[in-house]
Amino acid sequence: MLISGRPPDDVAVPVQIRRLGGDESVIPVWRNGLGGLTFQVGAGPSRRFAKWAPAGSGVDLPAEVERLQWACEFASVPVVLDYGADADGAWMLTAGLPGDSAISDHWKENPETAVRAAGVGLRALHDELPVDRCPFTWSVEDRTEQAAVAGKDSTSGLPASTSIDKLVVCHGDACVPNTLITEDGQYSGQVDMAHLGTADRWADLAVATWSTEWNYGPGWEETLLSAYGVEPDPIRTAYYRALWALDTTPAPSP
């Protein structure tokens, strides 16, 4: 299983992505755990980003396209410029947002600013996206049902279910690498939104705080929660982290 992170500079650029770039530079910037790749096309304020999902990878680009097209009306998320698919895979081209990932080399050296920006950004997303107009869900019921369909045990290992604290439109993958931060340390926007949908805000908060430890080391969870504007909730945090682990555990081999 691949680990998310920056791919090597010499990674092969799919011909479909090269075609999108034309004569501009095409630089690999991210590889997710399923083998999907993201490339920066061009540079400066007009840069774009192209995602590539190899056939059979399990990366659901159509779902992300649909969600971004809805969310961009309300929040700072990438605008979809192009989408397509063929026998080799699928691709999506989006306009670039200002700033860099919260785990760029610069922000890893300045974790307090990065973590605060991630908390502010997540709160902004939850406040801006209208629950009553969202056509997508990311509910516990949907997620456990999908796990069961994938052949995973969706009951063992989960703590007792918990009530909803506040229903919001969740990011669906609120790990800090998906927060963008401008040079002056301000939140700029969010990326990677294939699972966006309505759910308890702790479905995002539990993972966002968890990811601060993965990316910056221990001790930053309460900084993110403070920036978001909420007190710690250990019970909901434990529940949604267990659910996240269920989502991300590979299905057993047949």
Image (cartoon, grey):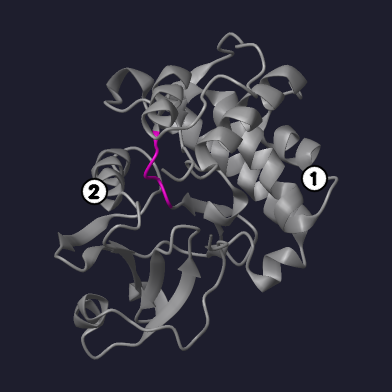
Placement of 75 over or under 242, stated as above or below: below
Left or right: where does residue 42 sit relative to residue 86?
right
**Who's the residue at 76% across and 22% down the image?**
234
Cβ atoms at labels 1 and 2 below 8 Å apart: no
Q: Is residue 127 left or right of residue 116?
A: left
Q: CA distance from mark 1 to mark 2?
A: 34 Å
Q: Nearer the viewer, mark 1 or mark 2?
A: 2
Query: Which label was assigned to residue 62?
Result: 2
- What is the magenta range? 192-196
Residue at 22 percent of width and 81 percent of height = 15
Q: Secondary structure at mark 2?
A: helix
Q: Is residue 203 above or below residue 75?
A: above
**Outermost right residue:** 219
How many residues crowd around disc 2 within 10 Å: few (fewer than 14), some, or many (20 or more)? Answer: some
**Res. 220 mark:** 1
Does dot 1 land on a helix, a strand or a loop? loop
Farthest-out residue, front: 254
Q: Position of residue 69 (x, y in %)?
A: 24, 45
* Figure quadrant of residue 182: bottom right
- Is residue 193 highlighted in magenta? yes
Q: Is residue 241 above or below residue 107?
A: above
